[in-house]
Image (cartoon, rainbow, N blue to C red):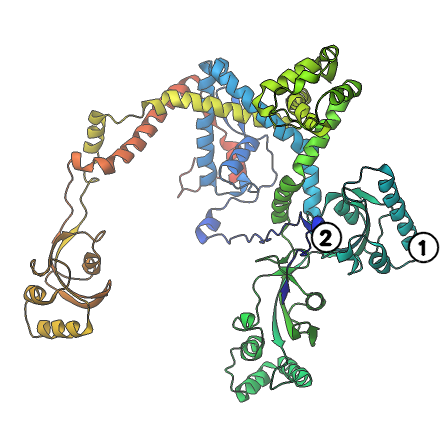
Amino acid sequence: MLIPAMMSSVRSICVLLLLGLVSIPVVAQKKAAPSKRTAAKAAPAATSYDPAAVLATVGSESVRLGEVERAFQKNLTRRDTRLSSVPRDTALEFLRLYVNYRLKVADARDRGLANDSAVRVDLQNNRRLLSETFYFDKAVAESRIRELSGRRLYELEIGVILCAVPEQSTRGWDSLASRLKAERLIASIKAGADFDKIARDSSDDKETAGNGGRLPWISGGSIIKIVEDAAYSLPAGGLYDRPLPSRYGYFIVKVHQRTPRVSVKFRHILLTPNDTRDTMATDRFADTLISILNMKPSQQNTTLTQRKLTPTGDAFADLARAYSDDKTSSAKGGFLGGAYSRSSGMENNGSRLVKPFEDAIFALKDGQISTKIKTIFGTHIIIRDSSRVPDSLAEYDAAKRTYRRLYYEEDKRMVLDSVRKSMNSGWDEGVLSELLRSIDSTKNTQDTSWTRTIPEGLLERVIFRLPGAELTVRQFSDTLRRRIDMRGFTLNRPGLDRAINKIADPVILERATSRLEETYPEFAALMQEFNDGILLFKVEEKEVWSKLKFDTTDARAFFDSNPGRWMTEQKYDLTEVYVLTDSLVTIVKSELDAGKDIADVAAAYTQRDGMREQRGKLASVSPKTSKSAQLVASNVKVGQTIGPVKLEAGWAFIRLDGIIPPQQKTFESSISELAPVYQDALQKRLTENWLSGVRGKHAVSYNAGNIDKIWGAPSQKSGSK
């Protein structure tokens, strides 16, 4: 009974409108209840939040709450967690790590690593990448993502009328005629004409026209931007007062309904006529089921029992399993699977319900049962079980992904073009026109002979102006020939536009982002973090990572300083009879019950390969590799026999003959286990020795007053500083 979210006609404008549709399941984030231990140690609620509060000093540098909190949120992916809200011990351990980080960076600066040529190149490359992303985020993305996430909290039912421009048309009057037609239709609708009738009679998108121009319900990021922007600017019943231009023609937009977005869970019972039940009998049977569902629970139980059904306490599910003709959902008590919203469909696959069914669900309240609902599939009885509104944080994340996928590149181009214009940078249109007339537009830059037709007098003329520089036709054409990334551009206006963008955009961006640190303190902080990270990597490589070598003498000393740590595991001596058939289980059990030695029985009957000759002996086996050893490793005494027990594809009788206790390993035999532990200990030792020296130059002190004010005084039990 589900219909696809997309229309089937490839040429339909409705399809083109819906190409941007995203179906990202919205999962409300449920905060886990704190454990008793966590709750007991949680910090008291702070009376005020002061990000400038000094928690520690490293030499002359102050370590403030705000910067430590940012690091905490980034490193532990707890972006909305206040550091002041976590337990004192957790916060102070992170503060200690952060102070060590600041010590390492201070040492790197003392060594002059910031002036190292390789480091400076890394810093410049980092800034170039970070500044571009930050600039576009601030210039357009942040506001657009906020706008889009706000739209995703609402859903609209809209209608569109398309006044199309003929495909491949290059005649301006075609576009004008389409716009004038759209303006006439808007005037008629404003004068009182019925939108749905005009859509059916006049829209050039025949598929949507047949539905009065109505599209499936939409939410933010569902349709082309210009139509969505117009729709979300209107109230319910509103008509956009001018035609909207697009590559398909001119759109007229009306909003029929606007409601908060909600996802619902529901179940249904489907009844269809069959050989023994005609349409009228099906309707009467539906009435019977509805009357049962509206009974009191005690009456429902009695009625279900009379119908030879076993009541489970959920009468709707019981009736769905017994009578629903939708066999896919009936087994699940009528549940189709997942929640449903009008703008994104079923959360598991995006499928849409037929309109009468969808309308019925959203006309119900939670827990309410419908009357008979008729669709092309039959007669339905529906219960709306529950509903939820979107989680704003999850919607923001979904909006961010949608924006990056659908709109980001287009908006970047618009911003760059605007900035380029403000810097008086751009084509000399006259020179560009002459160049285009002189070259073969059927070729592309892969053909290196394309420049031969350019007149000599044109080559030295300026074709493009950059901030502080000019580009001649010769320089431009030489660049297109030399650069591999310029190969394949078409030799027409769109192709040359793309080519000049690759040349000009980096210059424009460098100018536009040159003073970001002054304009945005958060960017200055971001750059500082990345720069410090590069310095940290360089200095830590010198002091720790380059010295992490396995020194046999040092490793042996580490081995000797930890007696009892490097032990063999406890193993077991066993005798086992393993058989694969019930008949042999009976024989083995009877012989063991009669007092026969298990080794003799194993020699006669065990079916494990090669073990009859060994009389079932399993010597020095480990529970890690032997399931038989696992069975006797606990609660079995030496000399005791257990079985039959299910083991692998058969059964086993097992006697525990002896226990081999753990033994001290030799240094050589423990190396595989010792090496990673030794490396970890060596890393910690190298780090601490290094930091001890740095602390001599940059004294560390903690501000106990501010720490106690934020997290409370330390408990005697925890012993925290």
**In the rendering, at what x and y percent does residue 631 appear?**
21, 60
**In the rendering, at what x and y percent does residue 195 appear?**
85, 57
Front: mark 2 or 1: 2
Query: Label 2: how many residues lie within 10 Å, few (<14), some (14-19) or many (20+)?
Result: some
Q: Is residue 77 above or below residue 268?
A: above
Q: Is residue 182 visible?
A: yes
Query: Label 1: how many residues lie within 10 Å, few (<14), some (14-19) or many (20+)?
Result: few
For marks 2 and 1, give the CA distance.
Answer: 29 Å
- Horizontal side of 519 relative to 543 (left or right) equals right
- Horizontal side of 257 relative to 591 (left or right) equals right
| Quadrant holding the N terminus | bottom right
- Horizontal side of 65 relative to 585 (left or right) equals right
The quadrant holding residue 90 is top left
The tag on residue 595 is none
Q: Secondary structure at mark 1?
A: loop
- In the picture as drawn, the residue positioned furthest to the bottom comes out as 306
**In the rendering, at what x and y percent does residue 176 appear?**
87, 41
The quadrant holding residue 693 is top left
Q: Amino acid at mark 1?
A: Ala
**In the rendering, at what x and y percent does residue 197 appear?**
86, 60
Number of dots carrying numbers = 2
- In the picture as drawn, the residue positioned furthest to the right comes out as 191
Most foreground residue, 123 or 239: 239
Q: Residue at x 19, y 40 (%)?
A: 564
Q: Residue at x 72, y 56 (%)?
A: 217
| Quadrant holding the C terminus | top left
| Residue under numbered circle 2 | 12
The quadrant holding residue 690 is top left
Q: Residue at x 66, y 55 (%)?
A: 6
Most foreground residue, 563 or 281: 281
| Residue under numbered circle 1 | 191
